[in-house]
C-alpha cells in the first residue's frame, strides 16, 4: 500500500527507542523498572504508532508523537507488562465451581499451610520417624483412607491423569467394558474414549445412550476383558426412559468373573448433599462401600481443595498403579499436597467442613443469607447517588459448575446494574478491567452480579468499581 505525504511525514516523526529511554531517565515512575521492560515497552509503543500511521488511523496525529504523550503511552505499557497475568478476581457469576475462574476457593486453613510449605523446606519425601527417604503420598494416604474407608490411596495432578494412569496400569492392550451412556466429554474436549485410547486400553461399548442392562455387560465379557468401568455422568443427565447398572451390580459381576471394577466419579464428594436440601450426588464413601477396586475423582470441584486427581481403592490394585512408571510424570507437587492435606483434615468433621470449605459453604448457603448480602450491596450502591445508575434486586438461579450437579438450580439474589449512556457490554468490560476484576454476566439488558459467589469483604470493591465507571464515563 502506497503511503501519502502526511503518513510519510508522521513516520519520520516517530521517536527513536534510544530517545524514549533517555526521556525515561528523568521520570520517577520509571525508577525501579528493569531496563528490559523499558526497552520492550518503548518498542511496543513505537510499533503501535507506526501501525496506526500506516493503517491511516485518524487518531494518530503530530501531537501524539511528541515527548509527553509518548511517555504516557510508555508508562501505560510498562504498567501492563509489570502486572501479573494470573490474579485474583471477584466471581459474581453465581457459578460456584467456575472452571475459567480457578474452580474451587481454598479454605483459609489450606491456604495457610500452603504458604508455610511454600516458603520453607518440607518433609515431602522424608520420613521424619525413620530419618530416611519416604513417599510423598504418605501425608495424604492415611487420611484419605480414614475418610473414605478405602484400603489404599494415592494422588496425581488431576483427575484426567488419574483415569489415564489407572487404565494404563490395569488394561493396556486389553478390553475395558463401559456403558455407551457413560462415554462423557468434559471441559477442554477431554473424552473418555480418547483417554482410553491414549492409555492403550481397548474400548468395548455396551448398551445404548439411555438404557444399559447387566446382560449387556455379561454378553461383552470374554477372555480379553481386563476391566469393567463405570463413569459417573456428573456434567449431564439423561431423563425419561432410562436404565443403568449400579456400581454394586457391576462389582458382583466383576467378582464372579474375577475382573476388577473401576469407577470414575469425576467431581467426587465426601458430603451427602441431599442432607442440605440439594440433589443427591454419589459420595466416594458409597463407592468404596460398594466394593469398587479403583475409584478416581477430583481434588477440587465439589471437594473444594486444590486441583488434583485422587485414586482410592483396594490395596493390591492401588499398589500396582503406584508402581507404574507414568506415576512420576503425573505426580503431585508439594504445594498441592499441602493444600490438599489441610482440606482433607477439615472433612473429619463434616458439619465443620460445610462451614469452612468455601465451595461447600456457597453451595449450601441458605437463600436468606444471600439476600442479606445482596441487600447490603444494594444499599451501598444506592449511596453513590448518581442519577445515571439504575440498580435492581432480582431473584435468579446460581449453578454448581465444574461439570457437577447439572440439574441443580440454586435460588439466589442478584443485583442488576444499568448505567445510562453505557451498554451492558461496556459496563461488563469496565468491571472486568477493574483491579481486581469483577466478573459478572449479562442478562435482560443488564449487568448481573450474583451474590452467592461474592464474599463479604468484596462488597466495597464492587461499590468502588461501579463508582469508578460513573466517574470515568458519565
Image: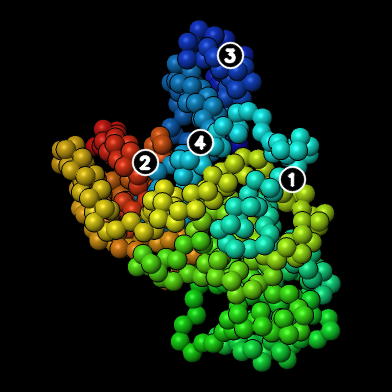
> Camera-side residue: 424 or 189?
189
First-in-chain label (1 vs 3): 3
Residue 101, given in percent of the width and then of the height, sits at: 48, 49
Q: Distance between the residues labelled 4 and 3?
A: 42 Å
Q: Residue at x 54, y 9 (%)?
A: 25
* Residue denoted by label 4: 112
Q: Please say whether residue 447 is visible from this viewpoint.
A: no
Q: Do the residues labelled 1 and 3 touch (CB within 8 Å)?
A: no
Q: How far apart are marks 1 and 2 (CA)?
A: 48 Å
First-in-chain label (4 vs 2): 4
Q: Which mark is residue 135?
A: 1
Vertical relation: 33 (above or below) 109? above
**For numbered disc 2, what is the local secondary structure?**
helix
> Which class describes the residues within 10 Å of circle 2: few (<14), some (14-19), or many (20+)?
some
Q: Distance between the residues labelled 3 and 2?
A: 32 Å
Q: Distance between the residues labelled 1 and 3?
A: 53 Å
57 to the left or right of 47 = left
Mark 3 or mark 2, whichever is nearer to me? 2
Residue 11, given in percent of the width and then of the height, sits at: 57, 25
Q: Distance between the residues labelled 1 and 4?
A: 23 Å
Amino acid at each position: 500500500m502506497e503511503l501519502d505525504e502526511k503518513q510519510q511525514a508522521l513516520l519520520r516523526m516517530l521517536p527513536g527507542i534510544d530517545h524514549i529511554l533517555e526521556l525515561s531517565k528523568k521520570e520517577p515512575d520509571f525508577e525501579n523498572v528493569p531496563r528490559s521492560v523499558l526497552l520492550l515497552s518503548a518498542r511496543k509503543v513505537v510499533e503501535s504508532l507506526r501501525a496506526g500511521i500506516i493503517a491511516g488511523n485518524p487518531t494518530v496525529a503530530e501531537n501524539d508523537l511528541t515527548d509527553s504523550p509518548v511517555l504516557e503511552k510508555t508508562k501505560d505499557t510498562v504498567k501492563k507488562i509489570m502486572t501479573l497475568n494470573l490474579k485474583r478476581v471477584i466471581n459474581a457469576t453465581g457459578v460456584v465451581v467456575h472452571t475459567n475462574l480457578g474452580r474451587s476457593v481454598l479454605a483459609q486453613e489450606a491456604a495457610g499451610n500452603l504458604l508455610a510449605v511454600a516458603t520453607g523446606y518440607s518433609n515431602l519425601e522424608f520420613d521424619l520417624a525413620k530419618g530416611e527417604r519416604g513417599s510423598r503420598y504418605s501425608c495424604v494416604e492415611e487420611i484419605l483412607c480414614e475418610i473414605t474407608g478405602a484400603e489404599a490411596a494415592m494422588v496425581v495432578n488431576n483427575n484426567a491423569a488419574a483415569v489415564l494412569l489407572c487404565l494404563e496400569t490395569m488394561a493396556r492392550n486389553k478390553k475395558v467394558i463401559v456403558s455407551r451412556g457413560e462415554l462423557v466429554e468434559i471441559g477442554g474436549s477431554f473424552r473418555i474414549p480418547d483417554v482410553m485410547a491414549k492409555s492403550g486400553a481397548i474400548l468395548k461399548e455396551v448398551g445404548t445412550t439411555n438404557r444399559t442392562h447387566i446382560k449387556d455387560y455379561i454378553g461383552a465379557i470374554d477372555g480379553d476383558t481386563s476391566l469393567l468401568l463405570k463413569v459417573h455422568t456428573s456434567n449431564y443427565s439423561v431423563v425419561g426412559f432410562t436404565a443403568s447398572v449400579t456400581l454394586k451390580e457391576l462389582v458382583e459381576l466383576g467378582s464372579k468373573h474375577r475382573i476388577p471394577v473401576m469407577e470414575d466419579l469425576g467431581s467426587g464428594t465426601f458430603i451427602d448433599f441431599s442432607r442440605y436440601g440439594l440433589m443427591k450426588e454419589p459420595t466416594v464413601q458409597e463407592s468404596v462401600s460398594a466394593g469398587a477396586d479403583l475409584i478416581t475423582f477430583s481434588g477440587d470441584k465439589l471437594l473444594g481443595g486444590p486441583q488434583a486427581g485422587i485414586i482410592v481403592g483396594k490395596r493390591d490394585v492401588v499398589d500396582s498403579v503406584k508402581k507404574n512408571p507414568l506415576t512420576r510424570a503425573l505426580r503431585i507437587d508439594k504445594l498441592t499436597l499441602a493444600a490438599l492435606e489441610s482440606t482433607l483434615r477439615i472433612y473429619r468433621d463434616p458439619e465443620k467442613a460445610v462451614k469452612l470449605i468455601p465451595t461447600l459453604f456457597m453451595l449450601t448457603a441458605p437463600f436468606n443469607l444471600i439476600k442479606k448480602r445482596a441487600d447490603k450491596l444494594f444499599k451501598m450502591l444506592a449511596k453513590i447517588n448518581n442519577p445515571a445508575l439504575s440498580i435492581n434486586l432480582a431473584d435468579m438461579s446460581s449453578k454448581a459448575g465444574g461439570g457437577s450437579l447439572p440439574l441443580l438450580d440454586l435460588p439466589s439474589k442478584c443485583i442488576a446494574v444499568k448505567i445510562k449512556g453505557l451498554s451492558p457490554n461496556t459496563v461488563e468490560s469496565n468491571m472486568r478491567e477493574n483491579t481486581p476484576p469483577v466478573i459478572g454476566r449479562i442478562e435482560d439488558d443488564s449487568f448481573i452480579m450474583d451474590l452467592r459467589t461474592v464474599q463479604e469483604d468484596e462488597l466495597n470493591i464492587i461499590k468502588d468499581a461501579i463508582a469508578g465507571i460513573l466517574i470515568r464515563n458519565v
